[in-house]
């Protein structure tokens, strides 16, 4: 009775990253994790009397670069997942491995592809047959096995629900908003591009996709303007700016090491590439700089640093400074 009521689960040691996560060679989206997010409410048309329908977000995340690709799907059927997979492959290339949970949409798509290959194996050329996608399913009821795409779903869904609110967008408007959110997520700085003290450019997932950082056209700030005085196009831009304001603060908070009120670690060194927290930046614009001076206090502990940015040298407290991780290639 006690064992059944208060049974303890087995807690094994955390495993190492799979080989697909650390493969140095290959191309973006070679190994992909996929998951669904939603549902979201979408208007069937503009104007009064429109009908609201449920739509979902298909999220594809690259295992090595953590780049994200978002697709809007109408329902959770296997056919719609196959259509979203074909749109993804047309723009990002065909992956070799596809990881997902045991949702019926994914298992149904796997059965359809397997049946197609089995029935048409004679007509397919050897090269096409050797380029088939390998499906991998995590254990049932174990979402922590797919933490990579679950984190992507959280970044997309958590703030998107709060930004949309009661706003009913059409399918095209919602799809446009998702592609802009995709660019925002793929613009995040990962690590410095070089150790040159004069280089303020970070490495982003956009570098792996288009070879350069993702940028956006300059727009007016619509975050404080009333919804009634905006056109539908301006409303979409307002949604993107609200999403950026929420998500960028959350991402910078994740970059900061939780050392406050704990043991002090003097890990902020000169020439380190850092992200400066700034609440008034436009979307896809990160304030980056290099540390040029560190100012210790009377107790010998440094809490303020001077940072050289593109606009000049500024002084900020450590609570506003987020150093980018530097990955060593030796060893």
Image (tube, rainbow, N blue to C red):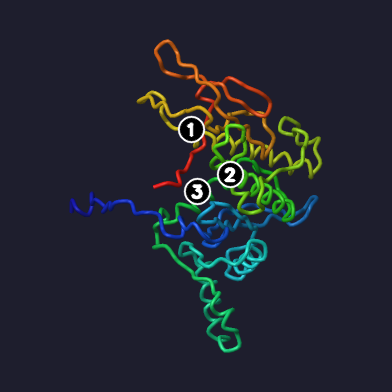
Q: Which residue is mark 3?
A: 151
Label 1 and label 3: CA atoms lie apart by 17 Å
Q: Vertical placement of 166 versus 38: above or below?
A: above
Residue at the extreme bottom: 122
Q: Measured from the top left, where is residue 201 in percent x and y? A: 62, 38
Please tell me which of labels 1 and 3 falls first in the chain: 3
Task: Determine the secondary structure under disc 3.
Answer: helix
| Residue 306 or residue 183, whichever sits in front | 306
Q: Quadrant of the N terminus?
A: bottom left
Q: Measured from the top left, where is residue 48 in percent x and y? A: 79, 50
Q: Vertical placement of 221 versus 163: above or below?
A: above
Q: Is residue 266 left or right of residue 44?
A: left
The crowding category of the residue bearing disc 1, from other C-alpha atoms within 10 Å (few below 14, some 14 to 19, many at least 20), is some
Residue at image position (61%, 47%) is 186
In which image quadrant can residue 165 be found? top right
Task: Determine the secondary structure under disc 1.
Answer: loop
Q: Which mark is residue 256?
A: 1
Q: Measured from the top left, where is residue 326 in percent x and y? A: 48, 40
Residue at image position (58%, 19%) is 315
| Residue 172 or residue 254, whichever sits in front | 254
The mark lying in front, picked from 2 and 3, is 2
The mark lying in front, picked from 1 and 3, is 1
Please tell me which of labels 2 and 1 falls first in the chain: 2
Q: Which mark is residue 203?
A: 2
Q: Is residue 197 left or right of residue 91?
A: left
């Amino acid at each position: 009775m006690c064992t059944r009521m208060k049974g303890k689960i087995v807690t094994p040691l955390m495993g190492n990253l799979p080989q697909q996560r650390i493969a140095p060679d290959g191309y973006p989206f070679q190994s992909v994790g996929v998951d669904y997010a939603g549902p979201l409410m979408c208007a069937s048309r503009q104007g009064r009397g429109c009908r609201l329908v449920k739509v979902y977000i298909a999220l594809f995340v690259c295992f090595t670069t953590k780049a994200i690709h978002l697709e809007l799907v109408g329902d959770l059927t296997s056919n719609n997942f196959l259509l979203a997979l074909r749109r993804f492959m047309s723009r990002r290339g065909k992956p070799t491995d596809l990881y997902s949970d045991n949702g019926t949409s994914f298992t149904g798509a796997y059965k359809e592809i397997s049946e197609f290959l089995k029935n048409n194996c004679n007509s397919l050329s050897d090269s096409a047959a050797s380029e088939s996608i390998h499906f991998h399913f995590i254990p049932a009821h174990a979402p922590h096995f797919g933490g990579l795409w679950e984190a992507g779903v959280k970044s997309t869904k958590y703030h998107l629900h709060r930004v949309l609110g009661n706003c009913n967008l059409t399918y095209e408007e919602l799809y446009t908003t998702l592609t802009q959110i995709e660019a925002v997520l793929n613009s995040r700085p990962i690590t410095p591009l070089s150790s040159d003290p004069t280089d303020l450019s970070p490495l982003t997932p956009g570098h792996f996709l288009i070879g350069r950082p993702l940028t956006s056209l300059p727009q007016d700030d619509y975050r404080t303007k009333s919804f009634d005085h905006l056109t539908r196009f301006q409303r979409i831009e307002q949604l993107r700016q609200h999403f950026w304001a929420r998500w960028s603060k959350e991402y910078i908070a994740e970059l900061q090491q939780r050392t406050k009120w704990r043991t002090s670690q003097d890990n902020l060194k000169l020439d380190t590439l850092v992200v400066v927290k700034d609440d008034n930046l436009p979307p896809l614009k990160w304030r980056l700089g290099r540390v040029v001076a560190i100012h210790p206090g009377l107790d010998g502990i440094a809490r303020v640093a001077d940072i050289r940015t593109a606009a000049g040298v500024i002084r900020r407290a450590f609570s506003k400074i987020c150093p980018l991780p530097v990955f060593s290639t030796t060893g």
